[in-house]
Amino acid sequence: MATKNRKKVKKKTKSRKSTSFFTAKRVIALVLVLALAVTGIFFAVRSHRTRTAIPYRFGKEKVYGIDVSSHNGKVDWSQAKKEIDFAFIRVGCRGYDTGDIFLDGRARTNMKGAEKADIPFGVYIYSQAVSEAEAIEEAKFLLKNIRGYKVELPLVFDFEYPTKDGKQIGRLADADLNRRERTNIINAFLKTVKDAGYTPALYASSYIYRSYINVRSLEEGTVIWVADYNKKVTYGGHYDIWQFSEKGKCSGVSSKYVDTNYWFTNEE
């Protein structure tokens, strides 16, 4: 009897060990499944991030538009309206040599024309700011010169380096700013226009977004406008507007080419 009892005890002990082992395996497996599920959700949210809200509804998920400056010459906005959903108009520019700010020669004419044709438009300034103070100066210049106009779309900070023979030139290149300094300069502009009640936006190339600024540190609510003339955007982060060509065509625009854009609005 004692021997049989000992055998039974051994069997019970073995059973308890076996049960504990398989329970532990189930717990580990469950934890791994949950971890993979959470990771998948995280990356899905990142890759399908909600588009930046703007104070205008197009009623479409994807809209088509142009951006113009004095370089595009005269624009017949009533003709352009037949093809476009929106426009961005250059209002000002800072020289990359002297650093002086000047009004685009066709800014007022273009704003009046787009407004009369009932085309929703935003405005931009070509920046060469090398300090936060200069960026704020550019924002105030833009705000001053759009008074009295129906600007419904974002106010844009156009951040790019002029080049010659493949090399960056001008005061912005000479300033030799680091990533943090560039981002702070951009944010100074974005915050100023946001505080004035407008939606801020940043225009730059895919390369600039990837290599020159801290995108995650940009002012909250900033519309991201990326220039990339490839078949798809090579910048891997979130963006709202894609300038897909600098050699587009549009009725009513007198220049040979015009910049063309898609805006992904996330609307139904």
Image (cartoon, rainbow, N blue to C red):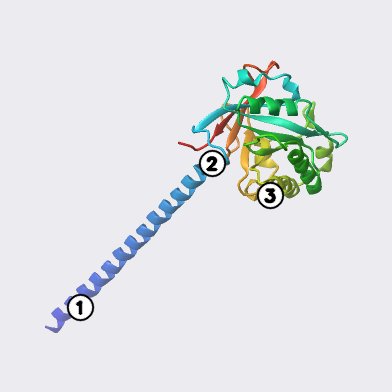
Point 74% across, 19% down: residue = 73
Q: Amino acid at mark 2?
A: Arg
Q: Decide: is 116 above or below 16.
A: above
Point 61% across, 31% down: residue = 120
Q: Amino acid at mark 3?
A: Asp
Mark 2 → mark 3, Cα distance in angstroms: 21 Å
Point 56% across, 43% down: residue = 53
- Can the viewer see residue 211 in this picture? yes
Point 39% across, 56% down: residue = 34
Q: Which quarter of the image is occupied by the N terminus?
A: bottom left
Query: How many residues crowd mark 3 within 10 Å: few (<14), some (14–19), many (20+)?
Result: few
Query: How many residues crowd mark 2 within 10 Å: few (<14), some (14–19), many (20+)?
Result: some
Q: Which quarter of the image is occupied by the C terminus?
A: top left
Q: Earlier in the sequence, mark 3 or mark 1?
A: 1
Label count reads 3
**Label for residue 195?**
3
Reading the image, the residue beneath label 1 is 9
Viewer-side label of 2, 3 = 3
Q: Amino acid at mark 1?
A: Val
Reading the image, the residue beneath label 2 is 51
Q: Earlier in the sequence, mark 2 or mark 1?
A: 1
Q: Is residue 129 left or right of residue 193?
A: right
Q: Decide: is 65 above or below 139.
A: above
Residue at disc 2, secondary structure = loop
List x then y, in percent, for residue 219: 65, 49
